[in-house]
Every structure is written in structure tokens, then in C-alpha cells.
Amino acid sequence: MWLRTLVSLGLLGLAPAASASGRAPRIVIDPGHGGSKTGALGAGEQLEKGLVLQIALQLRDRLEEETGAQVFLTREKDALVQLPDRVTFANGKRPDLFMSIHANSMPTRKLRERVEGIETYFLSAAASGAGARATADRENADAPRAQSVQNDSTLNFILNDLVRMDAHAGSSRLAYAIHQRLIASTGASDRGVLQAPFFVLTGVEAPAVLIEVGYISHPQEGARLARAEYQEKLVSAIASGVKDFLKDLSKRDAPSGADSETPQVASPTSP
């Protein structure tokens, strides 16, 4: 059962990660899949695992340059990293936010030709709809003893309780900040900010989102996702959303009349 697995792995510490006073932001980026877990397959045998790694590596460089953040990747090459290990790695870095990068897919030819667009998720026990649940089920397929969350009433209780926790509220704000930038920058179909029970988000002790950057299975969108100029738009938009979130976080946590002790976005300095 999921609950037994989560408890044994120590993945139920759901309080937000503490920030060290005055330090640079810490960000963990999780490129989905890897190794033998190829993820979705696109036109021309484009693989999700390779696409999301390309985006994650560019995003790391952009965030380090524009925010002064310490950015960590759960994988930096085509390697298999189990979902629980990704969560453990992320929590070990005590991040201010976590982003898991994926590309979506549809199972039938008819749907593959029709469905496209960007979705951004944060954690919830109840999926936003059938499509969100299908996406979560697919991404959770690599989880240990993966099964439908709705059949585990104890885990449902724990996840439903997230609505009262800061990490969950922060995840919602992060999701909207990133999603708005992505749609504005790319002009992609807006499939919304959604909620679903993703294993990789369950135990992260910080605001955490999962971004489906598009449908790799769609003929036109899949081709766009492979292009360097479109990846640049995605990277720039996600980075802008992160900066928006960090600025908002700084304002929320700053004591009245005092400088904030939360991580700050670094200002560019003259040479």
C-alpha cells in the first residue's frame, strides 16, 4: 500500500522547508523518468525522458544566472532515479521550491491528433477530473506498489489535510505563477492549473508543482517541443514564474518595517 511505503520511507513530513537567514534560494528541479523509464513517446520516436532533461538543464542555468539560486537536479543525465529517491534527494537540499518537469501524452490516435496544451499541477488527494487522474496514474506508474489513492482512506485523510498547511498553499501560488507565464509566453492551449495525487509531490517538504510542458504525442505540439527556440520560451516562462513566486514569498514573510529573512531574488550587478 502507498501509505506503508510512504511511512517506511519517511515521506510524510509535509511541513515547508525552513529557510536559512539571508541565504540564496534553493530550488530542486526533477526531470521526469530516465534510464529504462522512457516516459511518453512522441512523433519521430521523441522520448519524454530526453526532452524534459534538456529543459531542466537549461532551466537550471537560467535560474542560477537570474536569481542567484542554488539549483539542484534529481538527475543530470539519462539515468533511472526511483520516485522515492527523488523525494529524499529534494528534502535533503531543504529547498524553497520543487518542480517536476514532464511531457504529456494521449493513448489513442484520435486523441493524440486532437489534445494539446500545457497543464500545471499541485498536490491533492482528489484529482481535478478524469484527465488529471489519468495523468497522475501514468506518472505514478513507476512508484513502489503504485495504486489508486482513492482506495486508501488513511492516505486520503493525510492528503486532504494538506489544505491547512503552508506547503500546500505555497504549491498553489507557485503553480499559478508558473502557469500564467507559460501560457502568455508560448501561446499554447491553456489546460489549466489542476490538482492530482502525484507520488513525487507527496513527500516534498516545500511548495511543489508538476509541470506538463505540452503533449509530446500531438503532431504539431510535439514538433514544437523538440525545437530549441520553443524550449527557450518554456525555460524563460518557468524562470519568470519562479521569480514572481520568490518575490511574493519575500513580501509575505518580511516583518513589517524590516528586511525579509527569506530567500531573495538576486539583483543583477554591474561588472
Image (spheres, rainbow, N blue to C red):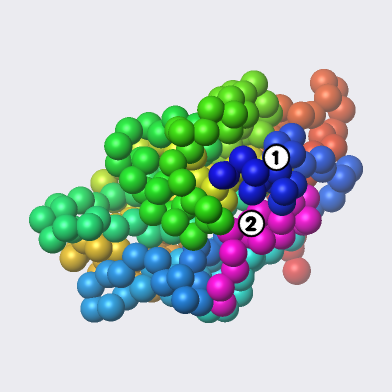
Sequence-earlier tag: 2 or 1: 1
Residue at figure coordinates x 82%, y 34% from the top left: 260
Neighbourhood count class around disc 1 (C-alpha, 10 Å): few under 14, some 14–19, many 20 upward: some
Up the image or down, 208 lies above or below 169; here it is: below
Helix, strand or loop status at disc 1: loop
Q: 169 or 148, which is in the foreground?
A: 148
Q: Which numbered disc covers residue 123? A: none
| Residue 215 appears in the picture as rendered | yes
Helix, strand or loop status at disc 2: helix
Is 147 positioned to the left or the right of 154 in the image?
A: left
Percent x, y of residue 76: 60, 74
Q: Where is the N terminus found, in terms of image quarters?
A: top right
Residue at figure coordinates x 89%, y 43% from the top left: 21
Up the image or down, 250 lies above or below 45; here it is: above
Q: Three-letter amino acid code at disc 1?
A: Leu
Question: Which residues lie in the magenta part?
Answer: 79-96
| Residue 248 appears in the picture as rendered | no
Percent x, y of residue 134: 33, 45
Q: Which numbered disc covers residue 12? A: 1
Q: CA distance from mark 2 to mark 1?
A: 12 Å
Q: How many marks?
A: 2
Is residue 92 in the magenta section?
yes
Q: Three-letter amino acid code at disc 2?
A: Pro
Up the image or down, 163 lies above or below 223; here it is: above
Which residue is labeled 2 in the image?
A: 84
Is residue 100 in the magenta section?
no
Is 248 positioned to the left or the right of 175 in the image?
A: right
Q: 124 or 180, which is in the foreground?
A: 124
Residue at figure coordinates x 85%, y 33% from the top left: 259
